[in-house]
Image (cartoon, helix red, strand yellow):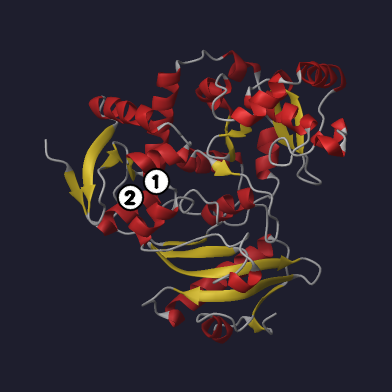
Amino acid sequence: MRPTELSAAQARRIALAAQGFTDRRPTGRVDRRHLRRVFDRVNVIQVDSVNVLARSQELPLFARLGPHPRTMLADAIDDGALWEYWAHVAAIVPSDQHRLFRWRMARDDEWKGVHRRAAELPKLVDEVRRRIRDGGPITAADLEQPAKAKGTWWNWDDGKVVLEHLYQRGEVVAVRRRRDFARQYDLAERVLPAAVLDAPTPTETEARMELFALAARSMGVATLEDMADYHRHWRPRSRQPLVAALVEQGVLLPVTVEGWTRPAYLHRDAARPRAVDARALLSPFDSLVWHRDRNERLFDFHYRIEIYTPPAKRVYGYYVLPFLLGDRLVGRVDLKADRAAGVLRVQGAYAEPGVDRAAVAEPLVDELRLMAGWLGLDTVAATDRGDLAGALRRAGVAPERSP
């Protein structure tokens, strides 16, 4: 059977619908029902500690729900509905998917350095287990390993290595402490519901196939490599049989997409909207944009995070959010929440080539003001940096000098 042909615009709209950008934002109280709806769409929310604007994991909810209680994710984790594990990278996923990651917990070949070092420290591993069992949750700082032990893995000391070993193996669960975002490690049975831990364990092949299907549903249309990246299936030779099985089952439909050089697959439940009328500021770690090659195929949008780039070499800024309008990424803004001054600072604003800046500025200002209010900031101010900055000022954003 000849694969279905999709235009680039169709693929883009399918991807946006799969990620929840055809769902209307709530107009009233935002509650757990809306949170579940977001996770039904995206399945995974990446965690990152950078807090120049807001914790990154909060931003995908704002993009899809608008203003909402900022404790919503933490409350759901405390209730056992959500859980943090190495899903994409460090990420939040529904707790009932615990069973789908047990194959990863049982393997030692993905975090070889951590597991190898832990194997050299059996007494410390047993001591940490005992301390958590008898004394309750601990942080890496609580173990107070001597400085000379640094350098074993990512400059972690041996206490941190042991905790991460136990975390990766599923013996303990990590929960972020609210006041400082530090990881606290506790026994899984004290954090996750018994029904989650007692759920039958699928085989590795069954679990990975289900994760591929979930990834495909969250992307709508995707290549094999796109699906593999979503939950980070590292071993290339193991991927194709999973996709072939899902095609045989009718879960995935082979398609060709205009401009894509690799075969693609459409999830059987994917919506095919004729139009998308979205508006959102996207975290650099949002699942819509975290795969940079896919961004270029879907949106013709070249995007790189410049947090670790020296300031003099940055093109757009430190913490840059793409702006989604309609079904296109039309610009990007470098944002900072100046909490002391009560200002959402636009440190740079840039339009994509060929975009009508005046047409972009008004909805972007509306979204910036909405975000400022959600963050408890009083006003939005923009420097003159970037080709969209002037349009923002004309649309009513307060001016300020570039730093």
Residue 198 visible in the picture: yes
Using a 10 Å C-alpha cutoff, classify the residue at mark 1 as few (fewer than 14 neighbours), some (14 to 19) or many (20 or more). Answer: many
User: Label 2 amino acid?
Assistant: Ile
Pick whichever, 62 or 216, lies toward us.
216
Using a 10 Å C-alpha cutoff, classify the residue at mark 2 as few (fewer than 14 neighbours), some (14 to 19) or many (20 or more). Answer: many
Farthest residue in the left direction? 1
Instruction: Please say if 196 is above or below 288.
Output: above
Q: Position of residue 244 (x, y in %)?
A: 27, 28
Pick whichever, 107 or 219, lies toward us.
107
Query: Is 353 situated left or right of 335 in this image?
Result: left
Q: Quadrant of the C terminus?
A: bottom right
User: Label 1 amino acid?
Assistant: Ala
Q: Position of residue 71 (x, y in %)?
A: 71, 46
Q: CA distance from mark 1 to mark 2?
A: 6 Å
Instruction: Please say if 270 is above or below 316.
Output: above
Q: Position of residue 69 (x, y in %)?
A: 68, 50
* Residue receiving disc 2: 14
Instruction: Please say if 299 is above or below 129.
Output: below
Q: Quadrant of the N terminus?
A: top left
Pick whichever, 290 or 127, lies toward us.
127
Residue 167 visible in the picture: no
**Mark 2 element type:** helix
Query: Is 164 situated left or right of 242 in this image?
Result: right
* Residue receiving disc 1: 18
